[in-house]
Image: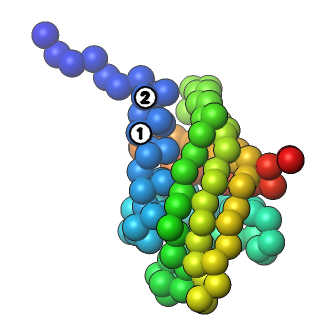
């Protein structure tokens, strides 16, 4: 008997772990594989970025994450697209300064005849 194909929810949940671990390791190659070519990244305090600019931050080594943890994660698949929401708490060092972030995030995945890719990532400050 053959193994059933992995459900989109399980596959996306696994990709969320890959995303988090890549940030902790500063693994630009893993993020490059996850990012759609036309990804749009919008986070507080930074200019909107595309794939090249975002990967450039990791390749320079200027920013290091000490913590990159998600909680309250919900995954919703809609055919060839999916939305993942949750809370992201991270601690990062950038140019020798430490920053703490507590964000709510929305990530949009798409599948265009191949593996799932992140097409958009948006974060905003968690309301207090």
Asked whether, in this view, residue 20 is left or right of residue 70, the answer is left
Residue at image mark 2: 10
105 sits left or right of 95 in the view: right
> In the image, 65: left or right of 89?
left
Query: Relative to 109, is 125 above or below?
Result: below
Q: Position of residue 94 (x, y in %)?
A: 61, 82
Q: Going by the picture, which residue comes out furthest to the right?
A: 128
Q: Which of 121 and 64 is in front in this view?
A: 64
Q: Is residue 126 visible?
A: yes
Say which element carries label 1: helix
The residue lying at 75 percent from left, 63 percent from top is: 43
Instruction: Judge from the rendering whether residue 10 lies leftward or rightward of residue 107; answer left or right.
Output: left
- In front: 55, or 66? 66
The residue sitting at 51% across, 75% down in the picture is 64
Task: Name above or below for residue 7 compared with residue 69.
Answer: above
What is the crowding at mark 1: few (fewer than 14 residues within 10 Å), some, or many (at least 20)?
few
Q: Residue at x 44, y 71 (%)?
A: 26
The percent position of residue 124, horizontal first and vertical second, equals: 80, 54
- Label 2 close to label 1 by CB (< 8 Å): yes
Q: In which quarter of the image is residue 21?
A: bottom left
Crowding around mark 2 (Cα neighbors within 10 Å: few <14, some 14 to 19, many 20+) is few
> For residue 125, what is the image quadrant?
bottom right
Please give the name of the residue rendered at 59% of the width and 88% of the height, measured from the top-left corner: 96
Residue marked by disc 1: 14
Indicate the position of residue 83 as horizontal and vertical percent values.
Answer: 65, 36
Please give the count of numbered marks on the rendered protein: 2
Image vertical order of residue 32 relative to residue 4, above or below: below
Q: What is the spatial separation of the Cα atoms under label 2 and label 1, in whole angstroms?
A: 6 Å
């Amino acid at each position: 008997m053959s193994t059933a194909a992995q459900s989109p929810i399980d596959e996306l949940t696994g990709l969320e772990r890959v995303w988090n671990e890549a940030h902790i390791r500063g693994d630009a190659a893993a993020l490059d594989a996850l990012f759609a070519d036309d990804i749009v990244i919008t986070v507080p305090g930074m200019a909107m970025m595309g794939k090249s600019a975002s990967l450039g931050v990791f390749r320079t080594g200027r920013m290091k994450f000490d913590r990159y943890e998600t909680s309250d994660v919900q995954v919703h698949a809609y055919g060839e697209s999916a939305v993942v929401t949750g809370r992201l708490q991270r601690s990062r060092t950038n140019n020798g300064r430490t920053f703490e972030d507590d964000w709510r995030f929305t990530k949009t995945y798409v599948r265009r005849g191949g593996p799932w890719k992140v097409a958009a990532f948006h974060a905003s400050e968690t309301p207090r």
